[in-house]
Image: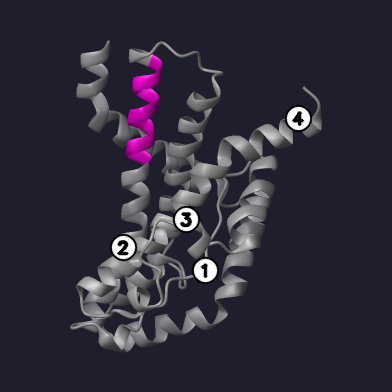
Amino acid sequence: MNETDSIIQTITVYLIPVLFAISLHEAAHGYVARYFGDPTAANEGRLTANPLRHIDPFGTIILPLILSLLHLPALGYAKPVPVDYGRLRNPKKQMALVAAAGPAANFAMGLGWMALWVVMIQALGMPPDDFFVKMAEAGYGVNSAMCIFNLIPLPPLDGGRIVTGILPMPLARKYAQIERYGVYVFIGLIVMMQFGLLTGFLVGGMHFLQSIFYVLLYPLIFILS
């Protein structure tokens, strides 16, 4: 297989998992925000699994592909779902829950993709190099990577907003100010990944998360074995 064929194969295998990992991550923020009183995302039509409503051309498609070709976790981002924290019934506490909804959605999707992989391998006897088996692997890999990456405790990542919601108010205000430098934070994290300074944390976190998937799916694996 030449390099062009390899790139095309990578795109086709990762496209659907990446699009839905990012889209449902964003939609989850909006659903939880609406539950706690903020309908902003709903009013703008962002409570949908339709990737076209969430795609950012660079963050959703180009960046994950570049990272994948560099043998790094295929991370990306979508257009952020708008949340008006002032409309939440308990803004400080509930902003943490709104932020946690995105990684929680990735956790659920990762578990679902791994369950599909188990069924294809063990129940259907599909070979490991089958296109759909590879897509399922990409699915739980992408979602575990997104979950761990977004839990890094730095604004504007979800982990940073969770920390902001937990800290006492004086500290929370100061910590939240990091978010104004969000672009630089994200670039800095990508550079750290490129030089291997963050890779150990991310890969270790992904393996830990996937071990949780395995434990949760053990009854299914046992039944199909």
Disc 1 marks which residue?
79
- The mark lying in front, picked from 2 and 3, is 3
Q: In terms of sequence position, does the residue under pointer 3 or pointer 1 come before the other?
A: 3
Whether residue 111 is situated above or below residue 104 in the rendered picture: above
| SS state under label 1 | loop
Magenta range is 110-121
| SS label for mark 2 | helix
Q: CA distance from mark 4 to mark 2?
A: 38 Å
Q: What residue appears at the point 23 percent right and 32 percent down from the top-left corner?
A: 216
Q: Which numbered circle lies on residue 22?
A: 3
Task: Please name whichever residue, 168 or 207, is drawn nearer the observer in this view of the structure.
Answer: 207
Whether residue 196 is visible to the viewer of this picture, yes or no, is no
| Nearer-N-terminus badge (4/1) | 4
Q: Are marks 4 and 2 in contact (CB under 8 Å)?
A: no
Q: Which residue is mark 4?
A: 5
Mark 4, other Cα within 10 Å: few <14 / some 14–19 / many ≥20: few
| Residue 139 seen anywhere in this rendered image of the structure | yes
Q: Which residue is mark 2?
A: 100
Q: Residues within 10 Å of mark 3 (few under 14, many from 20)?
A: many
Q: Which mark is residue 222?
A: none
Across and down, in percent, residue 63 comes to 65, 55
Query: Looking at the rendering, which quadrant does residue 155 occupy?
Result: bottom left
Mark 2 vs 3: CB contact within 8 A? no
| Residue type, numbered disc 1 | Lys
**Is disc 3 in contact with disc 1, using a CB cutoff of under 8 Å?**
no
Q: Residue 225 location, x and y as percent? A: 27, 10
Earlier along the polypeptide chain: callout 4 or callout 2? Answer: 4
Q: CA distance from mark 4 to mark 3?
A: 25 Å
Image position of 113 (left or right of 90): right
Q: Is residue 225 left or right of residue 208?
A: left
Residue 111, magenta (yes or no): yes
- Residue 129 coordinates in the image, percent (x, y): 56, 18
